[in-house]
Amino acid sequence: MTPEETTERDRLRREYIASVKANLVGQLDNTYVIGTDGIKRKLQHKAGELDDVLREQSKKEE
């Protein structure tokens, strides 16, 4: 594999991973949990965790 092909493969891999992460975040943003009391609640993000994922994703896209 030539150096150019290796560079392109790495770029495409990063793009794919970023896309998968973004899709997962989107799915989780639309996920609800029904508690034992029968109340439907939206999933909550862990403090800072989503920001870290999105920050990492934007760095890789640059």
Image (spheres, grey):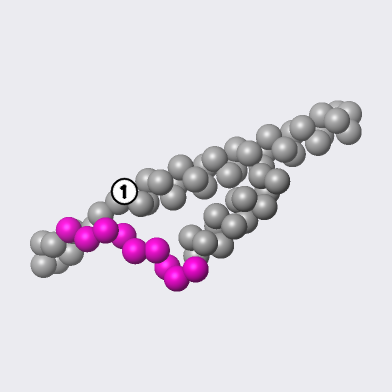
Q: Is residue 50 above or below residue 4?
A: below
Q: Position of residue 7 (x, y in %)?
A: 81, 36
Q: Magenta: predominant secondary structure element?
A: loop
Q: Residue at x 62, y 50 (%)?
A: 58
Residue kind at label 1, given as amino acid type:
Asn
Q: Residue furthest left?
A: 38
Q: Position of residue 54 (x, y in %)?
A: 55, 55
Between 6 and 61, the one lying in front of the other is: 61
Helix or strand or loop: what does disc 1 sit on?
loop
Q: Residues within 10 Å of mark 1 (few under 14, many from 20)?
A: few
Residue 43 lies within the magenta run: yes
Q: Residue at x 39, y 63 (%)?
A: 45
Q: Is residue 19 above or below residue 28?
A: above
Query: Label 1: which residue?
Result: 30
Looking at the image, residue 38 sits to the left or right of residue 52; the answer is left
Report the magenta residues as a range.
Answer: 40-48
Q: Quadrant of residue 56?
A: bottom right
Q: Residue at x 49, y 45 (%)?
A: 22
Residue 41 lies within the magenta run: yes
Total numbered badges shown on the rendered structure: 1
Q: Residue at x 68, y 48 (%)?
A: 60
